[in-house]
Image (spheres, rainbow, N blue to C red):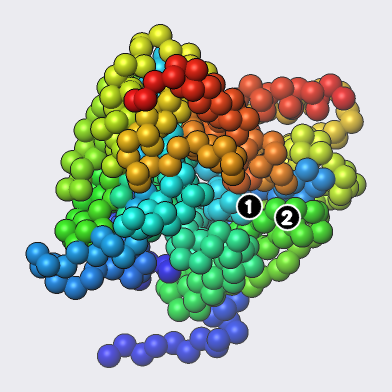
Amino acid sequence: MLPDDAAAAVPRAASTSFADFLGAHHPGLLPSNRTLGPVTASTDASHLAPHATTIVSLTFPGGVLMAGDRRATMGNVIASRHIEKVFPADRYSVLGIAGSAGIGLDLTRLFQVELEHYEKIEATMMSLDGKANRLAAMVRQNLPMAMQGLAVVPLFAGFDTDRHLGRLFSFDVTGGRYEEHEHHSVGSGSVFARGALKKLWNPRLTEASAVRVAVESLYDAADDDSATGGPDTVRALWPVVYVVDGAGARRIPERDLESAAHTIIEARSAAGREA
Amino acid sequence: MTQQFYVSPEQLMKDRADFARKGISRGRSVVVMSCRDGIALVAENASPSLHKLGEIYDRIAFAAVGKYNEFESLRQAGVRYADVRGYSYAREDVTARGLASVYAQSLGAVFTAESKPFEVELVVAEVGHAQDSDHLYRLTFDGSIADETGFVVMGGAADAVVDSLSGAWSSDLSLPEAVGAAARALRNASRPQADGTQPGVPPLDPSVLEVAFLERDPDTLRGSRRAFRRVGGPELENLLQHEQDT
């Protein structure tokens, strides 16, 4: 626990990354160190674990918002109606996961500890770009698992406290990091959600209207993608929505989401259209 | 071949302890105080960035006196220990008791085996959901560990600070009251000729104080599971000004 010699103390103290520390001292605890054996074209483990699907995120003046539906699927079976796929990463950022749910949850937990660890060691917060880069590195480390069908694709949003605006990042399985503008969506229902976002988003949204836009785009995704769950009025399950602004990240309360969902459902029923 | 002089183990340990004690007594004092709303940590520290008080985990904080590089390496090791433990088990499985015993082992090993003992004294504080479950573990340079109740004072003028605090402390102080009491005790101890009640005593100076709270109920106060919060700038000035007026 204490440095053996003075020369080793400096490099060890210099690393502020929790994931690097785990990799060096407890490699078995890293999610990326669990592999399913050699990668071959025929190994496909995608049917082994539940999949989390659609995440949408959009910016509005003064902040950014992220929302996820509540469904996880395994093949044609609904594995969960309660799963949460959007999480606060730290005070000023949130992330959502699409893809293999188990890997995504582990990645989220590691990322949360990574940010908190940096903050405690350095006595300052990591920059938003730094956070996005760390997340990209973690996604890249999962590449062998992604090759075997257990891919996870996060969406990351946060408030940049230097520039005073909400920013949005998407990733691919190779760890590519792409800054998105205005809005973005990942997961199997994302094509439908993105179509809705294109029509509903405008640069003058307020926070409340941004929540409505996010819920409506998830509604459209659920309409056409069987792996995305819509608002569940029977069980009173609504999407998980987080807003990040200058005051930090906070979860939108259920009652607001319930009224947003009911407004959308009523408007759609009243319109009397098939699609 | 040079002949080694024989030094008895008693003498060796005594010399090392004297050396470490001397190093610690040069530093300024730190007060860690359990009270109604949580645990107040107050240090005399002129630097705004080289902290003597630090966060370890959700409900656990660290306070130290002595050599900065030595206690900073211990603090970082403690953060790593706590984060690995919380990540591999669960957040509730990280306890001050576990951390304190790891520190005790490390300090003890350095005291007996290394060429120089650590010149540090530490407190590992854990705030409980009720005051009965607060923990203050005090660790000294030789790895001995003590479970304290109420408050702990470490550093140079520790005895004088304890004297002036023992009258002021009670278990139902609020956090600002505890900070005020600790700040007064630290100031009185550093200027032994001045009496707190006499006029002309210099005001409580926020620029030489480092203050942090472990709040008992951070979830309802700030919507965070992290109980540690630094108090500085205008908030600290207000708090000490208010204390000065009353």
Check if mark 2's residue and mark 1's residue have beta carbons within 8 Å. Answer: yes
Chain identity of mark 1: B
Specify whether B34 is left or right of B115: right
Q: Which amino acid type is shown beneath numbered disc 1?
A: Arg
Residue B23 % position (x, y): 56, 58
User: Where A153 falls versus A63 (above or below)?
Assistant: below
Q: Which amino acid type is shown beneath numbered disc 2?
A: Gly
Q: Mark 2 to mark 1: distance in Å?
A: 8 Å
- Sequence order check, earlier mark of 2 and 1: 1
Q: Residue at x 60, y 34 (%)?
A: A254
User: Where A204 falls versus B116 (above or below)?
Assistant: above
Q: From where the camera sits, is residue A248 visible?
A: no
Q: Residue at x 55, y 48 (%)?
A: B55
| Residue A108 or residue B46, whichever sits in front | A108
Residue bearing mark 1: B59
Classify 10 Å Cα crowding around label 2: few (below 14), some (14-19), many (20 and above): some
Residue B124 % position (x, y): 63, 58
Q: For the C terminus of chain B, which image quadrant? A: top right
Name the element at disc 1.
loop
Answer with the quarter of the image where residue B244 lies. Answer: top right
> Which label was assigned to residue B128?
2
Kindly indicate whether the residues beneath marks 2 and 1 are on one polypeptide chain.
Answer: yes
Q: Residue at x 49, y 32 (%)?
A: A242
Residue farthest to the top, as pictured: A204
| Residue A268 or residue B130, whichever sits in front | A268
